[in-house]
Image (cartoon, grey):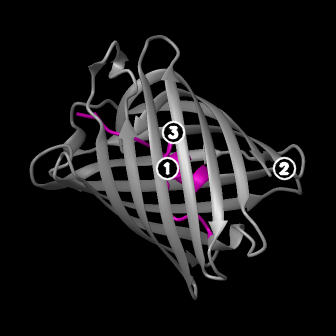
Amino acid sequence: MKLTATCLLCVLCTAPGLRAGQTPVVPPVEAAEATGWENEILLGYDSHYVFRGEMLQKNVGWAQWSLDVPLSDTLNLNVNPWYYHDLDSDFNEFDLNVTLSASLGTYEVAAAYNGYYYPRGGLGNGEGLGDEQEFALSVAHDIFSLKATALAAYNVGRDGYYFELLVAQPYEINDTFSVELGVAVGFDANYFASGMGFNHVQAMLSFPIKLTESIELKPYVAGNFPGAHLDYEDTRLFGGVQLGFSF
């Protein structure tokens, strides 16, 4: 069974997310114009792969493709495959995330399917982890300059639920450089441990640098602070960088 998957960078970069790596939450409807599809290729490196408060691997590289398909002025479909590999071992993972989102006034609501697959059993040679399937609902709303997102996810194999509240604040320094601060708080029910309990708090500071109109570099630093349902985890600092190409 999968240990877990995706952190704060994922939400910030693909939705996010939160992910040193990825859970897609609400892809903004306004990002895709009604005249055509939008694509983004992301390449990244994380010193630690932390997903929902749990550290899975260290020293990982990953690649992601995000496709936005506008279905109407308010409805958007996002397909988001993501692959990562532990640079020190044979551990690998392929995620397929499909999200249908709608803009309802000042709110964005989304329904998503997240599939977590291990082409080589995670550890290689067919050994390690079993594939997992997940369904999620999220609501995002701008509060002043803050972007607040609430997420609820159901994992079929675990028969457990994960809940997260994310608040993100961007600061534009100039036309090419900005700073983004994000804080996520997670809870779960029968996901990491029996019953309902506090999962973790994660804070991330990222520094998007617009190299051209279509290329962006985004280094980040983050801190993860586990709760009662992740009492076997250590408080840790980690970081990474991603390079994005949009077209």
Label 3 neighbour load within 10 Å: few <14, some 14-19, many 20+: many
Q: Which residues are magenta?
A: 1-28
Looking at the image, which is closer to me, 2 or 187?
Answer: 2
Of the pair 27 and 130, the residue shown nearer to us: 130
SS type, badge 1: loop
- Residue at 58%, 88% in the rendered image: 105
**Amino acid type of the residue that numbered disc 3 sits on in the rendered structure:** Gly
On screen, residue 166 versus residue 121, left or right, reads right
Circle 2 packing at 10 Å, graded few (<14), some (14-19), many (20+), is: few
Q: Is residue 6 magenta?
A: yes
Could you tell me the amino acid type at mark 2?
Ser
Q: CA distance from mark 3 to mark 2?
A: 21 Å
Disc marking residue 18:
1
Residue that label 3 marks: 21
In the image, 44: left or right of 187? right
The three-letter amino acid code for the residue at tag 1 is Leu
Question: Is residue 241 found left or right of 163 in the rendered image?
Answer: right
Looking at the picture, how far across and down is residue 148, in whole percent? 50, 69
> Which residue is labeled 2 in the image?
214
Identity of the residue drawn at 82% across and 50% down: 177
Q: Is residue 246 above or below residue 28?
A: above
Mark 1, other Cα within 10 Å: few <14 / some 14–19 / many ≥20 = many
Q: Nearer the viewer, residue 16 or 233?
A: 16
Mark 2–mark 1 Cα distance, whole angstroms, equals: 22 Å
Query: Residue 144, image x and y in percent?
Result: 62, 78
Marks 1 and 3 close (CB-CB < 8 Å): no
Q: Residue furthest left?
A: 194
